[in-house]
Amino acid sequence: MNPYLAGKTVVITGASSGLGESLAHLCAREKAHLVLLARSEDKLAELSGKLESAYDISASFYPIDVTDFAALEAVTKRILDQHDIDVLVNSAGFGLFEIALDTPFETVEAMFDTNVLALIRLTQLFLPTLLEKNEGHIVNIASQAGKIATPKSSTYASTKFAVLGYSNALRMELSETNIHVTTVNPGPMTTNFFTIADQSGEYLNNVSFFALKPEKVAEKTVRILGKKRREINLPILMNIGTRLYQVMPSLVEFFGKRAFMKK
């Protein structure tokens, strides 16, 4: 799928489940060595064992809450002391579908800490090594919600707008280097994301006809590692909608209001 990855070392946050876990499997299949980060030590240990056994690669793991910024700095130092990093995939994140007024401020803080600040801090910590090598790839998992905000996702959409803004600026700053910056913008995925974001299960049922499998998003992502690619936008139908929104936002909001409220 991608010969670039053979022998490279890939750091993946949120690696214990969902898209992060799928990315780990596909990178390992391409003979990349892995550095896996997530909160659950048990899940990471199990995944690491499976990957090393199945693909004959090394899969180191570091249990970490990425919102503990002091611990994050310490674990990053350990990683850099032990590994030569080539790719950073910032995949950790969560959402909650709730109207703006009723979203607890503690949840707002936690979502920004996880989805935005941890991503920025990890990028800052790993970037000097990539700059020294003048080679590498930073992949930030954003969302179609970062292209078009909808009701009941004000905080989540805000975090993904921030990820896109940060990534776009960083890409320009690194344009004279051999370090690529790519954002991956999926629509709804059938992962445990929705066990928190939509506990009723109604939203995923309403959009099931174009909900993405994490394996598909992971495959599209792994294919472009090491290549100059600005964005990956999935699914196609939703991407058409977000492009139209950029041109005629009022019209899309008017006609899409009923669909947007199906959360």
Image (cartoon, grey):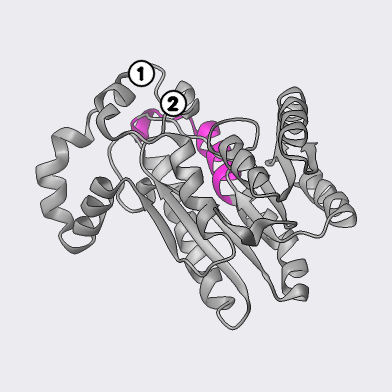
Left or right: 22 as drawn, with respect to 51: left
The residue lying at 47 percent from left, 28 percent from top is 191
Give the extent of the magenta segment: 99-116
Left or right: 153 as drawn, with respect to 117: left
Residue type marked 1: Gly
Residue type marked 2: Phe
The residue to which callout 1 is attached is 201
Q: Report, in whole angstroms, how far the alpha carbon at label 2 lies from the one at label 1.
A: 7 Å
Left or right: 109 as drawn, with respect to 186: right
Q: Residues within 10 Å of mark 2 (few under 14, many from 20)?
A: many
Counting from the top left corner in percent of width and height, residue 47 is at: 71, 29
Q: Residues within 10 Å of mark 1 (few under 14, many from 20)?
A: few
Above or below, comparing residue 121 to residue 137 in the picture: above
Contact? badges 2 and 1 (CB < 8 Å): yes
Counting from the top left corner in percent of width and height, residue 29 is at: 64, 43
Using the rendered image of the protein, determine whether residue 54 is visible from the camera's viewpoint: yes
